[in-house]
Image (spheres, rainbow, N blue to C red):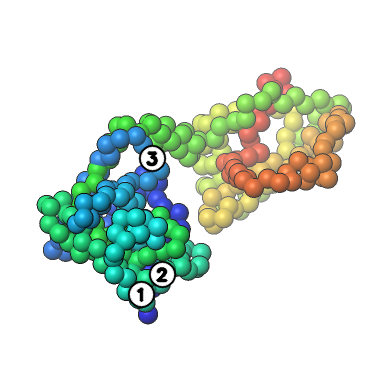
């Protein structure tokens, strides 16, 4: 029994463009007359629609879905367009991406006008409840041409590309007030820890990069000194530069009291939420800038 995978959620216009490009590349060597250029005349919608005209002259809008090889027609639409159609048993199964099966009644062969006004028989699977779908097999048989005015879409991709470039390899900072440290007592100066020879070159490059990015400032002398701790990142070669302030600065910082939200209150605020975001900050411990007077 053949299986056909059908996308549970139909592609948006951006996803649809990528699908068409992949299909054209995979079928470049095939002997086919399928021409798919992207052009959409009318308001921007979530789906791409195509008018399908039967031999009787009745027309209905179908969602163009290149993810499905089969075409599907809603039972109520079939009864209104062609009430005298002869239905046949079907052995096809339509499975969603979650594995559920789309209930099918039967299948029917309808004669459809192609773009060259030829009459082409197209097989449609009849669904109890489903949007009317024009699959890839029918698109090829009808030689449909579709196109999309990319200029009519909001200039979202350009803005996204700029944001990606800005955030990809750059270390920024949080837009908050500069951190101020209140110190009591004499400065503490500790000697450096010896770095293994195999890691010295990578550590030196990492420090030079941090200086170049404005994270660190080279000084000739200082009353404060704390050793750095080197750990290797997940790629196995990039050193992570950490400072050990347990025996230096932490001992001299003035204790500050602050009120924080209780865990129960925090969980209550999240109750009922369904959408969550995740942010992965590069060098997260360097995101809050230190006041120049405290450096």
Q: Quadrant of residue 23?
A: bottom left
In this rendering, position of residue 270 left or right of residue 152: right
x, y (%) of residue 11? 40, 50
For the point 41% across and 34% down, which residue is it?
156
In this rendering, position of residue 125 left or right of residue 164: left
In this view, the residue in front, 173 or 260, is 260
Res. 252 in view: no
x, y (%) of residue 235? 53, 55
- Is residue 25 depicted above or below 159 in this figure? below
Res. 58 in view: yes
Mark 1 neighbour density, 10 Å: few (under 14) some (14–19) many (20 or more): few
CA gap between label 2 and label 1 equals 8 Å
Q: Quadrant of residue 252?
A: top right
Residue 45, numbered circle: 3
Check if mark 2's residue and mark 1's residue have beta carbons within 8 Å: yes
Residue 103, numbered circle: none
Front disc: 2 or 3:
2
**Quadrant assignment for the C terminus:** top right
Q: Give the residue pinned by disc 2.
A: 105
Marked residue nearer the N-terminal end (1 or 3): 3
x, y (%) of residue 201? 52, 47
Q: Give the residue pinned by disc 1.
A: 90
Q: Quadrant of residue 288?
A: top right
């Amino acid at each position: 029994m053949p299986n056909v995978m059908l996308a549970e959620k139909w592609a948006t216009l951006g996803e649809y463009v990528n699908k068409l490009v992949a299909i054209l590349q995979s079928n470049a060597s095939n002997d086919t007359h399928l021409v798919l250029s992207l052009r959409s005349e009318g308001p921007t919608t979530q789906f791409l629609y195509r008018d399908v005209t039967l031999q009787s002259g009745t027309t209905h809008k179908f969602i163009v879905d290149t993810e499905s090889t089969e075409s599907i027609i809603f039972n109520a639409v079939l009864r209104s367009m062609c009430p005298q159609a002869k239905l046949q048993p079907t052995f096809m199964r339509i499975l969603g991406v979650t594995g559920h099966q789309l209930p099918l009644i039967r299948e029917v062969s309808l004669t459809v006008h192609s773009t060259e006004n030829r009459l082409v028989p197209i097989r449609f699977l009849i669904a109890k409840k489903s949007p009317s779908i024009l699959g890839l097999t029918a698109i090829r048989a009808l030689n449909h041409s579709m196109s999309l005015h990319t200029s009519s879409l909001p200039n979202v991709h350009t803005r996204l590309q700029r944001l990606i470039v800005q955030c990809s390899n750059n270390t920024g900072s949080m837009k908050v007030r500069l951190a101020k440290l209140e110190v009591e007592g004499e400065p503490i100066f500790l000697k450096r820890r010896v770095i293994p020879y195999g890691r010295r070159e990578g550590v030196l490059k990492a420090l030079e990069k941090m200086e170049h990015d404005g994270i660190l400032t080279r000084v000739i002398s200082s009353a404060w000194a704390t050793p750095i701790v080197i750990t290797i990142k997940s790629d196995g070669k990039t050193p992570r530069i950490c400072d050990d302030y347990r025996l230096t600065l932490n001992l001299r910082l003035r204790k500050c009291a602050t009120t924080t939200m209780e865990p129960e209150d925090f969980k209550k605020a999240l109750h009922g939420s369904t959408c969550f975001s995740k942010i992965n900050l590069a060098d997260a411990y360097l995101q809050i800038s230190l006041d120049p007077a405290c450096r």
